[in-house]
Amino acid sequence: MNTTPLMRQYLELKKQHPDTILFFRVGDFYEMFFEDAVTASKILKIALTSRDKNKEGAVPLCGIPYHAASGYIPKLLTVGRSVALCEQMEEAPSGKGKGPLRREVVRVITPGTLIETELLSPKESNYIAALAWEAEGERIGLAYLDLSTGDFRMALSTQGWDEIESEWARIHPREMILPETPVRADGSVPAPTHARMARLAEGRSVRFVSPTLFSSEVARAALVSHFKVHTADIFGDDSEALIAAGALLGHVQSTHKAALGSIATLRAHPLGQFMRLSAAAQRHLALLPASKEQDSLLSLLDRTLTPMGGRLLKEWLLHPLMAPDQIAQRQEAVAAFHDYLAQRTVLRLHLQKISDMERLIGRIGLGVAQPRDLIALSDTLSKLPELLQCVVMLSAPLIQQCVQNWDNLTRLTEQITAALVDDPPPSLREGGVIRAGHIAELDALRCLQKEERTGLVVIERNERARTGIDSLKVRYNQVFGYYIEVSEAHLQKIPSDYIRKQTLTRAERFTTAELRAREARLLSADVAAIALEKEAFDVLCGALAKEVLPVQEMARKVAILDVLSTLAEVAHQHHYVRPIVDESRRLQIVDGRHPILSHTQEGFVPNDAWLAPPDRALVILTGPNMAGKSTYMRQVALIVLMAQMGSFVPAKEAVIGVSDQILSRVGAEDDPARGMSTFMVEMTEMSQILRHATARSLLLLDEIGRGTSTYDGMSIAQAIVEYVQTIGARTLFATHYHELTHLETLPGVRNAHTLVRESDDEVIFLRKIVDGGTARSFGIHVARLAGLPAEVIQRARSLLDAREQEAQPLRRGASMAQAETEKAPPPHPVVEALRHIDPLHLTPFQALQVLTQLVEQAHASVL
């Protein structure tokens, strides 16, 4: 193995970061060695070579220009790899050094800790998350952080892992950290929840860290130290949530290796205040785009004009409220912007000029800001007074909450404007960042620089006159500094005091004592000036970093105004109405429209919806394929969700009783990765729905039982209807099993169907939902529309006629049996109780208890 000093230095640093791709800075390149080189070359599609290739034990090597790293790092992060940036911490000496330059890993970049603007989506949060839980899983702490914005939150679930999975699907963290050996709050080790962790880890990077970070003492100490508070209890008494937050903070501190000034506060995120939305519901309702081409509710609503507003809109969409008074506050603010077009228009014109305040101040707090970041922040802050003037007269409480304690942050703008030039270069290394007059010593150095550069012009003019070489030039490059260049044709004219510096193919480069002296003075002035500029810039950033929290608070106010005005803009454009949202369980929609499809399909037909427990809690919806049942169900759910996020809705009128969750089983899909058939996926999701549904839930159940035989499917579907009916949840149950329409006799169950018009053997789908059941599916007509051969259609019709004739006696028998059942007396309570007893799983004592209860029931029924 190669054991040069450079390789020993590399191996020592790699040992400290074994799970990363180590970007090892060598001059103008980041180089990778050994397995890192082999892995990175494949992922990045760059050439793999070797160091000391002609010697025994050559080391695999690949590299990239350091200035191009931002184009390569995302490719590694996308496949779940992390990158350790190792920088040269000193300049290379002019002569030969005694050993390798000092190098340090200055940052570990992981998928969840990105802060580079060019690597982040403007309207997407980039979360890293941590979990801490009790052995029994009854209390689970969740913490998540967007390092680029400083958005740091924690939540506690007392409802178990299903609630955590629901929240996980909404925040969609890029990375999760877990203890290598999970620990309880008291330090003892529980059995890990492998299946749950596997589901949460799907599609994201997982990092296992020292369990010490998850101990209560260490986690709380991390919070106390970072926020400079007396005790972590000021953030709440939810121990598991605090442990998750402290462990996450400790982990990020170990990877960023610099100040975490962007993290100015830790907010509690009360899960119980929001409607629960599972990953399946998000997918079935197309809340977020699955691809760039797919329409979604977010893409429809997102007319936000600032990155902060875009992120907040997505948060509101995925976290609908459940408190009618909070919903009404948002509605009133949307109504104010809806009704006052002038204020809304002017506000939105000003919002177009607002940059990403959160990420700009985040870069300052993290110590990675460049001069243009500060100018962008200053330009944005200068627009705050104009925003205030647009909304100060609007009386809606939520808008007035934004207006209260409004801070134009003029002090920050003044500091930046006083220190920096209006149009600085991208980097401090180029100089010319600090405004003239800000530092007297810097002004003096700049005068010296100007004089010396003027002197270079004089030298060039004098040397041309002295030598008679009109093409002689004084030039500069980073390797050789300043030099006199003479073409090959004039070499015989060079004076004897010229000192050769470099030979080229058609020219020679020289220096003189005078040029050396002036170069030394000029380079010394350049170095001193840049050092002064960097010092002044660091002082300015340090002052601004103390204002992270006020800037973040103003960024949130701007985001709220952006989202409210956006919802008003969409409502105005698409003729939405303000719904009534209350604590009832009524759901009444007049002329409701699907918010997405009503704009993409010509002649979209509006429909009413009416669910009002206990009399009308479950609607069995029948009708042929392609008649609009699934669209109708999704439409109702989307209107409910929009209402609870505070938006106006696509309808003529709407009364929405608050739902605690939307549970959906819509669409047929299998899961080959888990070896699950369509039917198994369907039943698994149904199991989740039935376990979590409450009387306040909204259920969308589409074609349950289709993945198995007709009789099995119909039996399962009926059993599910009967079970849901006992829960009392508002439910839309679409089915092809028309036999289920007889369940309308159950309390709270009603039938509805899609209207179809038949004319001359043609079927026209009217896409209108009306009350009552239907006895036909029109499946053969749908097959004909799909283009099946005429002979297939004809044969199907003859088979259908024959089977319907065969089924007539069976139907009559079934009807008589049903009538007899309806005449029969209700079963004895003791008999019903016996049906639910499993004697093989009762202990002797339990059996005695059951027998005693049955005797008491028998005596009571006789009396």
Image: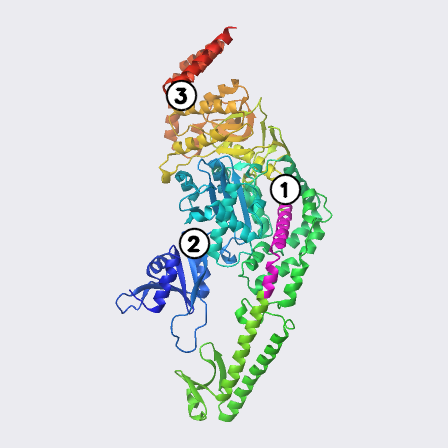
Q: Secondary structure at mark 3?
A: helix
Q: Which residue is mark 3?
A: 801
Left or right: residue 44 versus residue 415 is: left
Q: Spot the residue most to the left.
A: 56
Q: Secondary structure at mark 2?
A: helix
Q: Spot the residue most to the top.
A: 863
Q: Mark 3 or mark 2: which comes first in sequence? A: 2
- Whole-percent x, y for residue 811 in the image: 43, 15
Q: Mark 1 or mark 3: which comes first in sequence? A: 1
Q: Which residue is mark 2?
A: 77
Q: CA distance from mark 1 to mark 3?
A: 50 Å
Whether tag 3 and tag 2 are in contact, CB under 8 A, the answer is no
576 lies above or below 559: above
Q: Residues within 10 Å of mark 3 (few under 14, many from 20)?
A: few
Whether tag 1 and tag 3 are in contact, CB under 8 A, the answer is no
Q: Which amino acid type is marked by label 2?
A: Leu
Q: Which amino acid type is marked by label 3?
A: Asp
Residue 741: image tag: none
In front of the other: 352 or 96: 96
Query: What segment is highlighted magenta in the picture?
Result: 539-565
- Residue plotted at (58% across, 57% down): 361
Nearer mark to the viewer, of 3 and 2: 2
